[in-house]
Amino acid sequence: MAIVSFRSKALRLFFTKGDSTKLSPHHVSRIKAILSVLNVALSIDEIRAFDRYFHGLQPPGSNTFSMRVSGNYRITFRYEDGQVYDVDYLDYH
């Protein structure tokens, strides 16, 4: 598995260049761990095992998932054919 695309420019900058200036400093270590898992996990089950707050998003079967960063913040992504797409960083509330 590998991350193929990002929706969030802040995440893309952090992942590709290590630039965390657009991210909350309190979230950087958790985001780094999540992105690492998304980039190396071999299955969706490995991702699920990493985060107890992992869950699928609506509609069912959309292959879109969420992982908790902190409080209201989540990283969402789409998983297809062993690849991760559209990785985003959102405040749910």
Image (cartoon, rainbow, N blue to C red):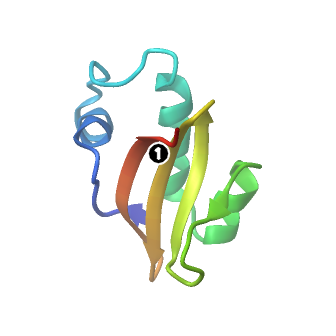
Residue 24 sits above or below residue 40 on the image: above
Image quadrant of residue 20?
Answer: top left
Task: Name the residue carrying label 1.
Answer: 35
Identify the residue at image location x=40%, y=63%.
Answer: 2
Q: Nearer the viewer, residue 44 or 40?
A: 44
Q: Residues within 10 Å of mark 1 (few under 14, many from 20)?
A: some
Q: Residue furthest front?
A: 93
Task: Where is residue 79? Give x, y as percent.
Answer: 47, 72
Q: Is residue 32 left or right of residue 11?
A: right
Residue 51 sits above or below residue 15 on the image: below
Q: Nearer the viewer, residue 75 or 50?
A: 75
Image quadrant of residue 13?
Answer: top left
Q: Residue furthest top?
A: 25
Identity of the amino acid at label 1? Answer: Leu
Task: Where is residue 55? Give x, y as percent.
Answer: 67, 61
Task: Where is residue 40? Give x, y as percent.
Answer: 51, 57
Q: Secondary structure at mark 1?
A: helix
Q: How many dots with numbers?
A: 1
Q: Is residue 69 left or right of residue 11?
A: right
Residue 63 visible here? yes
Residue 14 sits above or below residue 45 on the image: above
Task: Where is residue 80? Give x, y as percent.
Answer: 44, 79
Residue 1 visible here? no
Identify the residue at image location x=30%, y=33%.
Answer: 14
Q: Is residue 46 left or right of residue 64?
A: right
